[in-house]
């Protein structure tokens, strides 16, 4: 059985008023959940009791009265507490607290997960910003901030300067330290993947302390200097393009082997070295009465490959129909310190065509379909077996020859690119009633490696001008995996919910969810959502 309780509350919201000095905005959101998660094999159940709390503050018009086109300044910040009080909850008395404490009655490190925190605090952003300085030529930000472009979401502590010219072009220059997990008030979500980093506080040589050599894959969290530059259009609304470059360095000590050498020691790397260096460009052309064309790419200098590219075109066939096609190409790339750079990296390409239409004011529908191509070096069905035979491991009473396996792997004739294709499809429709709506959605992904398919039927009804709401959902999904046929199943579920909004500033929703299939049996969830908004 799984239960969930979630709530959100906006405590104070004071939006800035035009032409007033020192306008403030304070907002708080809270969500609480309680549920259980079973492992794919069903023999381990993890309890989760999560509390998500965010708090934001904005102070605007620090310069005094706001005047359009003239310099203005602001300070904004947002913090997040993402606690999980279900950590350690499933452990018995002998290893109580063992996920976050190294020493337990069951023994040292039996359940310990380095870097795992029960209540981590993340400073999402906190910066001071100035705009329209020097007759609109200059703007700046200083502090923790986000950058979002074709290279993805990224966060750093430092400064950004933006130069806006009258020739429809603006330039950005930024530098500082990349936000990394294990550093104070930080998260790892903006790092390049492939390296497990975190604080080593509490590590030592005593018997009741974890040692660095106990967890050689758990790397030190150290400052990561970074800088970047971007050129962006700032003119006609029908075109937007951005060329961006970013470089990040690793510093400090990195352990470079998983197991000790014959002397019992571990080799390390120290000093400043590359973490990532990438270039990207994206452009979007949009003609409101005709259609749109968009595309972009990223280049990874460390791997010397095109890490991704995307393209799309859509046609506005009148006011009620849009037809389009898209292609997306992606190759996984990693931090330059990651061992995953040693392995082969193969692309995933998705190509789809889509249509959306609104035949009437009450009825709309959309659909897309296409293929997803998974590529690999060699044939996954036979490569491992042939390598095993070449080395002699798979043949009894034969001398094992590791060099033969190496020769087989490096022989390009054995590494011809193979492609596996999945078919994709999705369809959705919605019909609006006077005081409600009904919707239907279906999806499918299928190929030689299995399938996943299903659909949802939803409905909502509003009463008393929207003050009261009732809604529900019925869903059926089926999945199969030829590699694990014991995990094949068909799942049925339904949701019943109701809501009330007694006043404009407050709303309450309550949901009951019930899911069932042969793998998990009966699962239940209760969700309560509360929203409060005060201010004007």
Image (cartoon, rainbow, N blue to C red):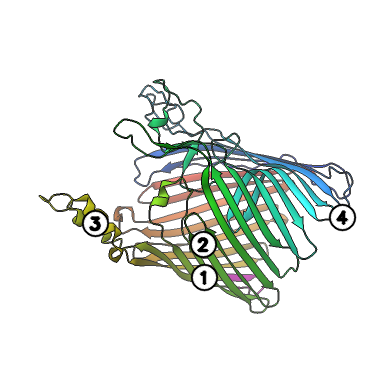
First in sequence: mark 3 or mark 4? Answer: 4
Q: Nearer the viewer, residue 427 or 299?
A: 299
Q: Residues within 10 Å of mark 4 (few under 14, many from 20)?
A: few
Quarter holding residue 488: bottom left
Q: Distance from label 2 to label 4 (Cα)?
A: 40 Å
| Residue at numbered disc 2 | 308
Real-space CA distance between mark 3 and mark 4, rounded to the nearest whole angstrom: 70 Å
Q: Is residue 72 left or right of residue 41?
A: right
* Residue 68 circle label: 4
Q: Earlier in the sequence, mark 2 or mark 4?
A: 4
Q: Residues under labels 4 and 1: Cα distance?
A: 44 Å
Q: Position of residue 391 (x, y in %)?
A: 20, 53
Q: CA distance from mark 2 to mark 3?
A: 31 Å
62 sits to left or right of 430: right
User: Going from the N terminus, do you reach mark 2 or mark 3 first?
Assistant: 2
Residue 208 against residue 311 in the figure, above or below = above
- Circle 1 residue: 368
| Mark 2 surroundings: few (<14), some (14-19) or many (≥20) residues within 10 A | many
Q: Is residue 526 left or right of residue 105?
A: right
Mark 3 vs mark 1, foreground winner is 3
Q: Is residue 290 visible?
A: yes
Badge 4 marks a residue whose secondary structure is: loop
The quadrant of the rendering that contains the N terminus is top left
Give the mark nearest the N terminus, 4 or 1: 4
Packing grade of label 3 (10 A; few <14, some 14-19, many >=20) is many
Determine the CA span between mark 1 and mark 2. Answer: 22 Å
Note whether 252 is above or below 364 in the view shown.
above
Question: What is the secondary structure assignment of the residue under circle 2?
Answer: strand
Q: How dense is the environment of label 1, judged by Cα within 10 Å: few (below 14), some, or many (20 and up)?
A: some
């Amino acid at each position: 059985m799984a239960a969930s309780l979630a709530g959100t509350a906006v405590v104070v919201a004071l939006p800035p008023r035009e032409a007033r000095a020192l306008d403030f905005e304070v907002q708080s959101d809270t969500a609480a959940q309680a549920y259980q998660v079973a492992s794919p094999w069903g023999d381990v159940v993890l309890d989760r009791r999560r509390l998500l709390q965010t708090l934001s503050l904005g102070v605007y018009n620090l310069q005094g009265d706001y005047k359009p086109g003239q310099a203005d300044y602001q300070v904004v910040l947002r913090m997040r507490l993402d606690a999980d009080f279900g950590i350690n909850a499933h452990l018995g008395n002998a290893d109580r607290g063992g996920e976050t404490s190294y020493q337990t009655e069951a023994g040292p490190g039996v359940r310990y997960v380095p870097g795992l925190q029960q209540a981590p605090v993340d400073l999402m952003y906190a910066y001071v910003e100035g705009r329209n300085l020097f007759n609109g030529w200059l703007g700046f930000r200083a502090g923790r901030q986000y950058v979002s472009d074709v290279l993805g979401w990224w966060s750093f502590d430092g400064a950004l300067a933006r130069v806006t010219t009258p020739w429809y072009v603006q330039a950005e220059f930024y530098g500082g330290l990349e936000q990394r997990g294990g550093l104070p008030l930080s998260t790892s979500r903006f790092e390049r993947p492939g390296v497990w980093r975190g604080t080593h506080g509490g590590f030592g040589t005593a018997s009741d302390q974890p040692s660095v050599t106990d967890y050689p894959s758990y790397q030190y969290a150290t400052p990561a200097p970074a800088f970047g530059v971007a050129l962006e259009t700032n003119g006609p609304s029908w075109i937007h393009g951005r060329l961006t470059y970013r470089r990040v360095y690793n510093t400090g000590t990195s352990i470079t082997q998983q197991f000790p050498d014959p002397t019992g020691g571990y080799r390390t790397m120290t000093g400043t070295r590359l973490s990532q260096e990438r270039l990207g460009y994206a452009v979007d052309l949009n003609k409101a009465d005709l259609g749109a064309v968009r595309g972009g790419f990223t280049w990874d200098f460390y791997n010397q490959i095109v890490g991704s590219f995307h393209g799309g075109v859509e046609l506005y066939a009148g006011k009620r129909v849009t037809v389009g096609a898209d292609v997306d190409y992606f190759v996984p790339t990693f931090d330059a310190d990651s061992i995953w750079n040693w392995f082969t990296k193969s692309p995933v390409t998705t190509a789809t065509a889509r249509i959306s239409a609104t035949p009437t004011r009450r009825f709309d529908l959309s659909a897309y379909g296409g293929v997803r191509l998974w590529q690999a070096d060699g044939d996954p069905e036979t490569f491992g077996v042939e390598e095993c035979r070449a080395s002699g491991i798979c043949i009894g009473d034969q001398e094992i020859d590791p060099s033969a396996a190496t020769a087989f792997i490096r022989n390009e004739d054995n590494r011809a690119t193979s492609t596996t294709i999945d078919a994709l499809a999705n369809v959705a429709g919605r019909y609006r009633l006077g005081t409600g709506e009904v919707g239907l959605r279906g999806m499918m992904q299928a190929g030689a490696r299995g399938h996943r398919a299903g659909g949802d039927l939803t409905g909502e009804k509003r009463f008393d001008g929207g003050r009261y709401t009732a809604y529900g959902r019925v869903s059926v999904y089926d999945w199969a995996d030829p590699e694990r046929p014991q995990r094949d199943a068909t799942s049925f579920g339904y949701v019943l919910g109701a809501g009330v909004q007694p006043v404009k500033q407050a709303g309450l929703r309550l949901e009951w969810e019930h899911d069932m299939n042969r793998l998990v049996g009966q699962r239940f969830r209760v969700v309560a959502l509360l929203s409060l908004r005060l201010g004007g």
